[in-house]
Image (tube, helix red, strand yellow):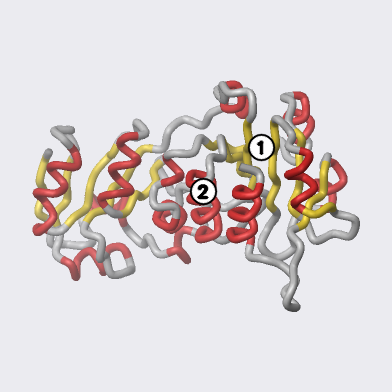
Amino acid sequence: MQLHHLADPHDPLLDDYRALTDTALRRVREPAGGLYIAESAKVIERALQAGHRPRSVLTQQKWTDAVAELLQGRDVPVYVVADDVAERLTGFAVHRGVMAAMHRPDPVPVSDLLSSISHRRSRIAVLEGLTDHTNVGAVFRSAAALGVDAVLVTPTCADPLYRRAVRVSMGSVFQVPWTRIENWPQGIDDLRRGGYVVAGMTLGAGAVELDELVAESPERLALVFGTEGDGILGETERMLDRRVTIPMSGGVDSLNVAAASAVAFYATR
């Protein structure tokens, strides 16, 4: 690896790491240059295992041996900075020792992603318009833990490769195959043609309870989760095969979307 000791947070070599606060990142759907930021050695390791390529690494001096082991001989520039330089550069205190600017992989067509699922029974999740990166990351972590085969994100959904989403997912965004389904909600017809029963999690009147969907046990199931505030769009809801709810008690009207996804993934496993 190539070690570069840098003392100036304004050095152009560090541009990929400039202003990485969630507020700054929310201004754009995708960071410039087709990059994303992987934070912590564990997350970077999972990204590398998934075949993603690092453009550079940012770290402090005490972590350089760990970075060398992580990169395993890859010819990658490593920028070594002091803690205060890292904080001035990124906009937050960097406690996890290392972060990497990673090249984004080319997007996979939905049809290719679905055809790559080889087993007869499968479950996928569709995230419609989720705006909170924490929720997106938490859904991916539950999907990985509970055996969901793939995740589709709609055009208005927050980017799974945002720094916070990647961190919350603990790198699960690299384990679960995913792509954007640009033609939404019309893409529901494509899922249906692929043999999927498309079930949306909703609080709307007339929805069946989750246990009924579980008893039905469709061979191929697509679970749709709507945005944090308003839930699934009306146009989407009208196209669903099933409208499903998790029964509530104790005066609670609903679960956070990340919690609801974990319940649904576990129940339909």
The residue drawn where x is 12% and y is 62% is 7
Residue 9 in the image: x percent, y percent?
21, 62
Amino acid type at mark 2: Phe
**Quadrant placement of the C terminus:** top right
Residue 69, image x, y percentages: 14, 42
Residue furthest bottom in the image? 251
| Pair 2/1: label in front | 2
Quarter of the figure with residue 262: bottom right
Amino acid bearing label 1: Glu
Residue 71 falls left or right of residue 148: left
Cα separation, mark 2 vs mark 1, equals: 19 Å
Residue 8 lies, with reference to residue 211, above or below; the image says below
Quadrant where the N terminus lies?
Answer: top left
Please tell me whether residue 183 is drawn above or below residue 58 in the rendered image: above
Q: Which residue does the image show at 23% across and 54% down from the upper left?
A: 98
Residue drawn at point x = 70 percent, y = 46 percent: 224
Residue at the outermost front position: 215
- Would you name the residue on which mark 1 appears? 182
Count neighbours of disc 1 (C-alpha within 10 A) and say few if under 14, some if 14 to 19, many if 20 or more.
some
In this image, 134 relative to 80: left or right? right
- Residue 83, image x and y in percent? 18, 67
Observer-nearest residue: 86 or 248? 248
In the figure, is residue 186 to the left or right of 66? right
- SS class, disc 2: helix
Q: Quadrant of residue 114?
A: top right
* Crowding near the residue tagged with mark 2, few <14, some 14–19, many ≥20 C-alpha atoms within 10 Å: many
The residue depicted at 66 percent of the width and 44 percent of the height is 268
Q: Position of residue 197 (x, y in %)?
A: 76, 35
Disc 1 secondary structure class? loop
Question: Residue tagged by mark 2?
Answer: 140
Q: Which mark is residue 60?
A: none
Of residue 269 and residue 38, the one placed in the foreground of this image is: 269
